[in-house]
Amino acid sequence: MKIKELFSEILDFFKDFVKVKTGLIGVGIILLFLILLILEPYILVYKDTNTQWRNITYWQDNPANAAPVWTQLFSKDKKPITKFIFDSETEEEDMNGVTVKSYIFDYKFNYSEAPQNIIFHGDANGFLGLQIFVERPDGEKFEIYRIAQNFSNENIRMTANTEARKIAYDFGKTVEDEQTLLNIDPNDLKALDVIFGEKKTGILVKPIPLKGHYKIIAKVLFLDSAATFENPYIVITGKVSGLLGTDNLKRDLFSGVIAGIKWALLIGVLTAVISVFIGLFWGVTSAYYGGFIDAAMNRIYEFFINMPMLPILIAISAVFKINIWILILLLCLFSWTGSVRTVRAIALQLKEEVFVEASKALGANHWRLIFRHIMPLILPLTFANMAFSVPGAILTEAGLSLLGLGDPSIVTWGGILHDAQTGGAFINNLWWWIIPPGLIMALLASSFVFVGWAMDKILHPKLRTR
Amino acid sequence: MYRKYVIKRLINAVVMYAIILIAISAIFNNTAERVVRQDIDDLLKAESQRVIKSGKFNVEQLEEWKAKRKTELIHRYYLDRPFLLRVFYNAYKAFTFKYGNSMIMRSSKGDREVWKILIEALPKTAILFTTDFVIVTFFGILIGLKMARKPGGALDRTVSFIALASNGLPLWWLGMVFLFFFAYTIKLFPSGGLHSVPTPTGFMNFLDLLYHMFLPLLTLFISGIWGSAYFIRQLVLGTMNEDFIMSARARGLSESKILYKHTLRSAAPPIVTNVILGLFGSLGGAIIFEGIFSWPGMGNLYWIALQQNDLAVVMGNTSLSVFLFMMGLVLLDFIYGFLDPRIKVGGKA
């Protein structure tokens, strides 16, 4: 019987809830986030985002500061996207007793800008000589990398380096006049822009991309007989990457934003639930006992109300390098006060009710009355409070992370924004680094406000205005 | 009767203020001690290097000198007293507004007195937030009254919705976005600070200030106006049901006269409360917000002092902010107690 009653009550609540449009929007957004949360393992582009966020080598094959891919959708001049090329033709020859293997990769280039970099990967072992060339559609050939080294079974990674810049400069020198050459600092030159540029005047100043089939040739010289080289592939990093671009450390921001969802939800919901329960207990107890206990509890409540929360949180996290769980505890410590007043007011009325007296007469002790009879009655009324205190917790944590005081072992939106602030997002005009994390945070936080507001409207009809 | 109420409220506030100072002092003292010990070790290392170079002492003498110097330094920074004593001592100092001298930070004139550093930052926070409160309240009243005229109308619904949504909007992120767009993309406004570097004088100085204040103000305005309008709408709608409005209507007064004269006047006290509370609360500065705009106010000062481990400034800053906030509360209670005799009776019971 009791369960049936409860069920019908819940049903009534939902019937009311559906009428409040704002609340529905809020629930919709929260559901969307929950779906994203469940699907996280599938939609994360980089599966190890959660553990490898601060590991630079994990992200090394992405372009840095690259715009989102979809920005190219409506523009005529397409910027190159990152391309992995695993297929290669192999040629083997013998050069004075040394085996030389050439891996030839085909790259079709028809973009309006040169790629950011060419990266060559392979598993090397033993004493090897490596040379990487780029052969252009017009027949010109550049050597962009050269090394001879003793490797011990490692995955190697090679990119165009300073040597390539010099070669590119020498190439450009042949077509530029002297006056322009004087104004050019070879150290500021982007080698790939020249290598992928048309060979005519202006190549060092404003290169025009040369479209067509490129060949990237990796020559491996087996300098000792035991040396091996396997699994060669190249990565041609583009100028656009992923759904939300990359940051200055080449991290995929879409993965970062998705990975941040669970932490924001965890911090917000856990803090809200714990602190409202503390507030509920506090309000009921002080109202129930009254007298000295009430006065003492009220003083403590006042103390927390007057404490400046943010400065103290900042000071504590700056000194102690706290992790996420301690931060949640601290947030609870400062935000349980939110619901005390309403709870106390309602509890003051409830304790005069007949059923309280009846239970007392039946021999119920104080704690039983508080926990079993009064608190469950008030609990539903605090749900609105719960929803309302979620945004505060989320935004406070994000604020701390923004200052660089967040838990360094997790990916949070505030942390991404902190990196944006310190990593030159402003100066380099990387809007995709600043807007999405904050926007998604605002969306999540305000959806809880909507839900809280709708609940408030239903649960406290008295407060309704018109 | 009123005097009794005032005294009671004042004692209550003073006791609470003292307790909060003790708590803050305990939190910061723990920090302060770590920092100071670190500093002492660093100093000692540097000094002993110099002593070794001068070659005056042999090894034994050096150790002896080191130990002596260390106790001397520890004594100087009160680290040899019991923890509780230090906490109370610092709380007492803050209570009497003796914030002492800073360790690293200086005021623009080079003073090391914490008080002078604070008094330099306070007006900068005050000017930003006071201007914001004036503008937001003014436009909030305008929009709120418009909303209350047609509750449930298009304007009312839109603004109410945005007001709700703005609760989840991080102010500092909005600041970052505006800064990004206005200062870096279209380069219309400065990227931070209070004045241009060769600070202009006279009237140009004022214009320069406005120019620098525009972006932070815009951010505060955009994030605050909706809530303010909604708050005033609620107040006005609440008073619209009162009898005196009905009688005004019965007398045939025009609707706009009722709205702007009668309703607004009776809704004024809560508006004033809200403004005063907000103002006193904001004087402590917005740490993150001011940081984003490099606005040299109290919040920014707090953050910089914390980063430089200048605990005297941190402690002074926090105590002063709490003091101002609580003073605002007390002041409000006084005004209300004066205006509404029922509160006094309630206070006594």
Image: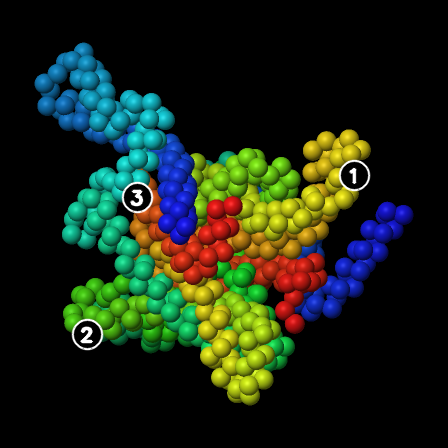
Q: CA distance from mark 3 to mark 2?
A: 34 Å
Nearer the N terminus, badge 3 or badge 2? Answer: 2
Depth check, front residue: A398 or A458: A458
Q: CA distance from mark 1 to mark 3?
A: 55 Å
Q: Position of residue A157 (x, y in %)?
A: 49, 48
Amino acid carrying label 3: it is Gly
Residue B16 quadrant: top left
Q: Is residue B269 above or below residue B251?
A: above
Residue B50 quadrant: top left
On whether disc 1 and disc 3 are found on a single subunit, the reply is: no
Q: Position of residue B324 (x, y in %)?
A: 35, 51
On whether disc 1 and disc 2 are found on a single subunit, the reply is: no
Label 2 belongs to which residue? B203
Label 1 belongs to which residue? A358
Element on which disc 1 rests: helix
Depth check, front residue: B210 or A205: B210
**Residue A332 visible in the picture:** yes
Chain holding disc 3: B
**Could you tell me if the residues under marks 3 and 2 are in contact, i.e. CB atoms within 8 Å?**
no
Give the residue displayed 39% in from the left and 47% down from the top: B4
Amino acid carrying label 1: it is Ala
Give the residue displayed 43% in from the left and 36% down from the top: A320
Residue A457 quadrant: bottom right
Element on which disc 3 rests: helix
Q: Position of residue B341 (x, y in %)?
A: 46, 57
Task: Select label 1 or label 2 by which is in front.
Answer: 1
